[in-house]
Image: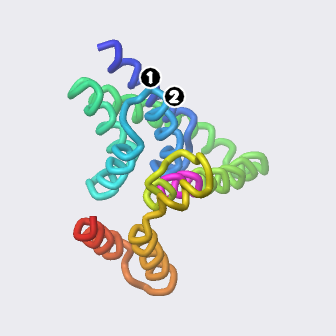
């Protein structure tokens, strides 16, 4: 019970201090998951992949999976509540404030500042997860060992997916599904 409440409080903290959706939250989630040994980096990466496939917001899916994996159904419920609660509270407060002051220069400047910060958080998370998938060694202890842990097939899947996403008009969902099947057959 205590561990479930602790997980809920951590997810409330993440929900209060992250703006920009599930992808912006991932780097914070990863930090806490590692810090409290809730699961390995590999497990976290797999849960991120599962969360992208399952219906619903990615942050809620991640919270539910982390809570369930660590303390069962109660943990899943409390972690999900923890991630939702700050959003509901902030939405009510901000909507009243925003309606009143939306056309002021200060509010417009704040909104313009939040956009690049969210993009930076998303890029940091994508980079971190990408490195973990392309290199089997998660900690740097010498360039030789790091290069030795390089997984060329993972890099090829990434590179082909990136090229298809940036150079064609193929729906990203099809690219993700195709990459998943290729990964299943190769690994």
> Is residue 14 left or right of 62 when viewed as pictured?
right
Q: Is residue 91 above or below residue 81?
A: below
* Left or right side of 183 for 21: right
Type of secondary structure dominating the magenta stretch: helix
Q: What kind of colouring is applied to the model shown?
A: rainbow
Quadrant in which the C terminus appears: bottom left
Q: Which residues are magenta?
A: 122-130
Residue farthest to the right, as pictured: 105
| Residue 128 lies in the magenta stretch | yes
Residue situated in front as seen by the camera: 158 or 101: 158
Residue 154 vertical placement versus 133 (above, below):
below
Residue at x-position 27% and y-position 54%: 55
Quarter location, residue 181: bottom left
**Residue 182 spot, x, y in % from top left:** 28, 72
Residue at 77% x, 46% y: name it. 106
- Identify which residue is drawn at 41% across, 34% down: 83
Q: CA distance from mark 2 to mark 1?
A: 6 Å
Label drawn at residue 9: 1
Residue located at (38% from left, 83% from top): 170
| Residue 165 shown left or right of residue 127 in the figure | left
What x and y, as percent, mark residue 99? 60, 44
Residue 161 within the magenta-colored segment of the rendering = no
Relative to 101, 154 lies left or right: left
Classify 10 Å Cα crowding around label 2: few (below 14), some (14-19), many (20 and above): some
Q: Position of residue 20 (x, y in %)?
A: 54, 49
The image's mark for residue 13 is: 2
Query: What percent of the width, then of the height, locates residue 87?
Result: 47, 37
Query: Does the residue at mark 2 contact the one at mark 1 (Cβ under 8 Å)?
Result: yes
Q: Residues within 10 Å of mark 1 (few under 14, many from 20)?
A: some
Give the secondary structure at mark 2. Answer: helix
Circle 1 sits in a helix, a strand or a loop, which is it?
helix
């Amino acid at each position: 019970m205590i561990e479930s409440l602790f997980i809920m409080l951590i997810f409330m903290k993440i929900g209060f201090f992250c703006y920009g959706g599930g992808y912006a939250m991932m780097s914070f989630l990863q930090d806490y998951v590692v810090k409290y040994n809730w699961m390995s980096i590999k497990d976290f990466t797999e849960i991120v992949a599962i969360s992208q496939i399952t219906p619903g917001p990615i942050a809620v899916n991640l919270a539910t999976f982390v809570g369930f994996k660590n303390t069962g159904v109660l943990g899943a419920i409390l972690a999900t509540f923890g991630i939702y609660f700050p959003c509901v509270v902030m939405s009510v407060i901000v909507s009243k404030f925003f309606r009143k002051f939306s056309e002021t220069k200060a509010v417009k400047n704040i909104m313009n500042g939040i956009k690049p910060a969210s993009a930076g958080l998303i890029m940091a998370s994508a980079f971190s997860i990408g490195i973990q998938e392309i290199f089997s060694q998660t900690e740097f202890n010498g360039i030789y060992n790091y290069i030795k842990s390089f997984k060329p097939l993972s890099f090829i899947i990434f590179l082909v997916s990136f090229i298809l996403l940036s150079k064609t008009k193929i729906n990203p969902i099809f690219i993700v599904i195709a990459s998943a099947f290729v990964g299943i057959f190769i690994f």
